[in-house]
Each structure stands twice: as structure tokens, then as C-alpha cells.
Image (cartoon, rainbow, N blue to C red):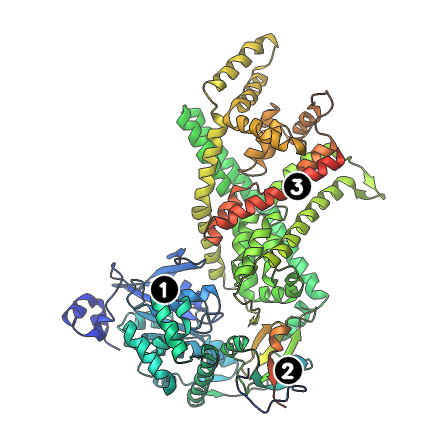
Amino acid sequence: MLIRPKSPKPAEQRRVTDLRLGETGTICCLKDPEMALKLLEMGCIPGTQVRLNSRAPLGCPITLVLGDDDYTLSLRVSEAATIFLKD
Amino acid sequence: MAGGEITIDRTASAASAAALEAVAAHLPRNPKGLTRIALVGNPNSGKSSLFNQLTGLNQKVGNFPGVTVDRKTGVSQLTPQHRAEIIDLPGTYSLYPKSLDEKVITDLLYDRTSEQYPDFVVVTADASNLRRNLLLFTQLADLGLPAVLALNMMDVAEQHGVHIDVAQLQQELGVPIIPMNARKGIGVAALKIVIAQTLDAPSVSFYTPSDEMLPMIRQIRYYFNLHNDYLALHYAHQFRHISFLSADDRAYIQELTEQYDFQPTPRQAQETIDRYARINEILLNTVAVTRTERNEPYSNRLDRVLTHKVWGYLIFFGVLFMLFQAVFAWASYPMELIDEGVAWINKLIQTNFHGPLINLLTEGVLAGLGGVLIFIPQIALLFAFIAVLEETGYMARVTFMMDRIMRKFGLNGKSVVPLISGVACAVPAIMSARTIENWKDRIITIFVTPLMSCSARIPVYTVLIALVVPDQKVLGFFNLQGIALMGLYLLGFFAAIFSALALKILLRRKERSYFIMEFPVYRWPRWKNVGITIIEKVKTFVFQAGKVIVAISVILWVLASYGPGNALEQAEAQVRATATQQHLTPEETDNRIASEKLENSYAGLFGRTLEPAIRPLGFDWKVGIALITSFAAREVFVGTISTIYSVGQDADMRTVQQKLAAEKDDQGQPFFTPARAFSLLVFYVFAMQCMSTLAVVYRETKGWKWPILQLLYMTGLAYVASLTVYQLMK
């Protein structure tokens, strides 16, 4: 279910996990409803800029920097994969 | 805001206006006449620092009813005449609880009729991250709770180029705002003055439920006689988890939500988005950000080393090494002092007074008390380390690096610390599992931690290994005894992680596991917080686990000192009768008496009763007694064995070893064959033989279910493993 439905392009829509290290994207929507509640509370609001900041040595979890608040989140790849990006 | 005098004489002013409902809401509910203030805020918003600043050492840790959350309260002297009780609530990002811990907050804030209901709340917010922090604030304000906003970390915000127009923000939010820096104590005095006043409910509303929900909300509101719509909406969202609602109440709300086709998840998401939109408007008017051309944050540069795939782990192992040094080596000096101190007091009492009650006091109560106090240095040091690691933000990095590995075994990045600390002592280790928010991960961690070989097993390991493993080198430099010792540690470690794996499959639980957390920037630790953490942990251990330990010590003492009828007197008389014939020295006679007495005591009786059960493992009744007394603490094994084999109490280990080697079985062969010794070693690796651990698990899980399961599981595992070892090696 979409929290903020927007022309669905299921096949090729990028996720936060598709970002390269240091690359920035804009959050479009959150795909897992329950996860979305948590992510929203922690500041992952659609329209916010997000940067893939680092990966743990074994590839998971990852850290994201949100907006221009210099606020860093650490989350598992499976959790981050529910965050989709605008084109 | 009303003036100060009115508040000081609160009861009188309230009595004169008792008819007014609005004033009645401000009546101090606490019978002692203290104002009740709840401290709420996001994690990492400086809430604990503020709590420590307000209350100092005037803190009490209790329990919230029914959940495994500590209820921290403290008394703060606001003005010379006015004291307030402060409740420190768990950190949360919103009023929609995601974990069991957070439910405590809603349970407290929903029920206006409760005796615990706060007069108002102090909301802490990180000024450098205001948008996310204000989400919780707006929810609290909409519940109609009188609130003060403590705008913390103003210095960090300034450094980031964030300028907040506090006066304007105060107007927009409709509550008093105190800019502060809780780490340094700046603004605490101003906050105290403000919270000593009577506060009105906030005048500004931040979110209005949409019209389509109103019919349902109003029905709930009038049915439960609630004071506002937003609270009624929360009832609709969370009726299943509100502990004070009856089954009928819940059924009523459920019916309504179905009737109006209320979809909680999208509603809640929409509310959050709407709130952020509103907060953005407010921030636009009140916050100016001057983007300074900044270098890359130092935290990021540090992280490149500290979470590096090689250096990161190496540094982590370095930190672990230090931790071990601290808990093993540094703690041993104060531990010896405590040991000697207790022994000295014991001797003092024993030389001056006599009688069975004195024995109970010295050998039962004081010995048990010594068993409690002896752990204090280890607990204090371990928690000093952990507190520093947490305060600096390094712990978040450890969790980050280890999560992937630990998750495979049903554990969590945060399980690393308890498991590793378990090698020193399971008691503080289990207490440190509290940082794991997820219930299932935490229970699994607590459950498997005692399988890690703790320091109390070392005396047992060394005595028995020295007995049956030859002291020789293999491949030129590996000491065989050292390899055996390492093997025992590895055995415990693998038992722990595979038990975790099994539990992961067995335990099914709906509570969803989130790893997502804020990644804090590196900071210098606040030593005051570290100190308070240490004191609090030690107090918790001494007063909560300590009670159980002393009680069991007393029971064990009674079992070892008394026997059925006059069996003990007869045993003593018999030894004395034969002593002169065998030309025993007085010391040897005493040892013989102690040994015979133990054999004829209730403990000895249990040992004999136990014998059929442990015979397949290769043990006899004497080992049985040692197994029973080991339950007080594993290291008691050596003392018991030396008493049973009538070695003097102050004998060093070599003589214990000689006695063990000299012990013969029925056929006159050495009793402790490699098969028997390894069987016993394996038993000590797995068995739950530590009442302190059980007591602390009881306290941490708030019930007997888990300690009992742990006792059965570990002892069962020990039995099967010992049986296998003995039967294969025999």
C-alpha cells in the first residue's frame, strides 16, 4: 500500500538501497505500512533528501543522512528497501 | 502562567475553586502534596541528563506495573518551599508506542483519573534537530497536557548554524520554552522556576482529526467521558494495548472502529505527515539556518576508522580486551578487600559470640551478604565501561558492525555486550541486556548469556584440568592444559549461540523487530551520568538480586549444618572417639569432624539421594554434595570438595588436587579418571548453578518463568552432555 500514491512504476522505481555511497536522493514514498509509521516518526518524510552515508563492513545495516538536519539514521537493508525514491 | 505564590499554597487555592473543573485538573494528585511532573522526550534528546540535573542522587528505580520497564522517579527541590516528584519516562519518538517500553508512556498519560497522572509534562527537545523532536511535543500538547518545552542542546544547534527565535517559537507553540544545555546544567535553574508555577493546558492545537472520523471519535469521547477529541482518537488507535480498559470497553471501541471502517495505519501515517507539515510552517517563522561551509563532520571521519572492516573490528577487540582487563584484573583487588573484610567481621563475631544463631548469622547471612557484595566491583566497572561506550556513541557503532553476524543466531547487534560480559560474570551481563529494546531478542540474550563460561567456573576448570590433562606441550609451544581450557570456553560459546538459534525458531512473537535507530554523533561522556549509572546499577543489584541470594545462602547453610535427629552429634562423637586411637592432630580431627558432619547433614542426605541420578554421569554422593553447594556459587565447588575430602579450609589448590588424585573408587583405582573429570567439567560448562544469575534473571524478566526454564534447560543440557562424555570415555 502506498502512503502517498504517485504514478506507480513498480519495476524500475529506485529505492534508497539503490543509492551509491554518498549519493543523494529524494524520498518519494514508503511502501511497508507498518515500517512507514516508524520511518515517518524518525523523520523519513516524503520529499526529504536522503543520502547513503555508509555501510556496515558486512553490507548491512546502513546509515542514512536525512535532510539538512545532519541527522543520521542506522537501519537494516531490509528496512531501508521500503523507502522509494523520486525519479 | 500564574504567579508563584498561588502554586505554593496550591491546596487552598484549589479548594476555594473546587467547583471549577479546569482548576480541579491542577489539584495535586499525589497525597504527599508533591507536584507530579513527567519527563518525556525523544531518545538522545538529553532527557536523562536533565533528569540527573533535576534530581541528582535523589532517584528511585521501581517498576511500572506489568511490564519490564524500570520506573525511574526522583524528587527535585524546585524552590526552597516547593518540591516536585519527577517521573523519567522511556525515550520515544511519538505517542504511538512501537515497543513494550513505550506503552508505559501512553498508559500513564491516557488515564486522567489515575493517581499517577502527572500535573504536567516537561518535554525535552534537541534544538539541533527540532523538526523531528517537535512531533512528539505536538502530540502531547494536543492531548491537552500542560507542558513546558525544554529546548536542549542549544549550543549544538548554534554550531550547526541553526538560530531559533525562542520568543516567536513560544508564541507559536503556546507553552513556556526554556533554552538549555542539560549537559552543562545551563537553563536548569530557569526550568525549575517555571515548573514551580501552575501551568495551564496549551492553548494551541496542532492537528484536528478529519471530519469523517468525528462521529466515531465523539462516541468514544462521550462514552468514556474524555476531555478532548484527540485522546478519544488515541483510544480508537490503541484500545487493545491500554491496560486500564476492561474487556467490555475494548469490545465497545472495536465495534465502533468496525462500524466506521476505521483504518489505523493509514490514519496514523496521515496524522504524522500533517503534523510535520504544520511543524514546517512553524519552523519557517522561527528558525533561521545559516549554512556555513562546513568541513565533513568529525563523526563521519572517525567512523571511517572506527567502523572500518579491518580497523573497526580490531579496535572493537581492543576495547573488549580492556573491558576484560578491567573486570578480571582491576576488579580483583577490591573483591579481595571485600572478601577479607567479610571474613574479618565474621571472625570478629565468631570469636566474641557463640551459639547456633551466631552461626546462622556468620555462615549463613554474612556469607550470603559477602556473596552479594563481592560482585559490586565487577558490576561497577562493567557498567562504567558500558556507560562510557554508550555516552560517547561508540556502542551504536558496535551494534552497527555486529548486527549482521548476531542476527543469524536470533540475536541482535546489541547482544554483543551481554554475551562478552558473560565471560566475566553473568550477573552484570544480564543487567546490561536492558539496552535491547526488542523483547524477543532480549529474552534470547538473557537466556543464553549464562552459558558463556564465567570467572566463577575458572577454579573448577583449573583444578580438574590439572588433574587429568598432562602439563605438556604439543607442536612445541601449545600447552595442552591451555588448549583444554580454551576448549571449555569455546564449548560454552557455541552452546550459547546455538541455543539462541533454537530459541529463535521456538519463540514466536508478534512484536515486530526494528533495528532502525538514531546514529548519534560522537561526544565526550558526561561523567555525572556515568557515575549515576554505576550507583543505580549497583543499588539495583544489591537490593533486588541480593535479597534472593541471601535467602538461598541461609537455606543452604541450614541444609549443610543440620541433619536428621542427632546424626551430626553422633558423627562428631565417633570421630573424637577414634581420633586418639589413630593419633590425629587436633587440626586433622577438626577436618575429619567437618567432613563427617557434612556427610550426615541434610545436604549430605541430598547428595546420597542424588547419587542414583548422577551415577550414570560417573559421580558419587560426594560430588553430589559439591553440585548442591555449588548452587550458591560455582567456586564453592573447591571449598566443598576440600571439606568433604577433609582438607583444611585454608588449603591451597595443590592439596585439593592431591586429595582428588588420592581418592579411590570401590576397586581401589583412582576415582577421578579422565572420563569422570571431563564429565564433571562439561557439567560445569553447561549447568545453571548460580542463584545470583537466577535472581537477576527473575528481576530482569519480572517473573519466575524464564529463570525456571533456564534452570531446567541448562541443567538438562549439562546432564545429557555429561552422560554422553562419561559413557563414551569410560
Chain bearing mark 3: B
Q: Nearer the viewer, mark 3 or mark 2?
A: 3
Quarter occupied by the N terminus of chain B = bottom left
Residue B150: quadrant of the picture:
bottom left
Task: Give the structural element (helix, strand or loop) at label 2.
Answer: loop
Q: How far separated are the C-alphas under marks 2 and 1?
A: 43 Å
Q: Nearer the viewer, mark 2 or mark 1?
A: 1
Side of B582 where B231 appears, left or right: left
Q: How far separated are the C-alphas under marks 3 and 2?
A: 50 Å
Identity, as a three-letter code, of the amino acid under mark 2: Arg
Task: Give the structural element (helix, strand or loop) at label 3.
Answer: helix
Identity, as a three-letter code, of the amino acid under mark 1: Ala
Chain bearing mark 1: B
Disc number placed over residue A15 in the picture, else none: 2
Quarter occupied by the C terminus of chain B = top right
Indicate whether B211 appears above or below B113. Answer: below
Q: Nearer the viewer, mark 3 or mark 1?
A: 1
Q: Residue furthest left?
A: B16
Residue, disc 3 = B720
Callout 2: few (<14), some (14-19), or many (20+) C-alpha neighbours within 10 Å?
many
Callout 1: few (<14), some (14-19), or many (20+) C-alpha neighbours within 10 Å?
few
Q: How far separated are the C-alphas under marks 3 and 1?
A: 46 Å
Residue, disc 1 = B247
Side of A38 where B260 appears, left or right: left
Indicate whether B251 appears above or below B644. Answer: below
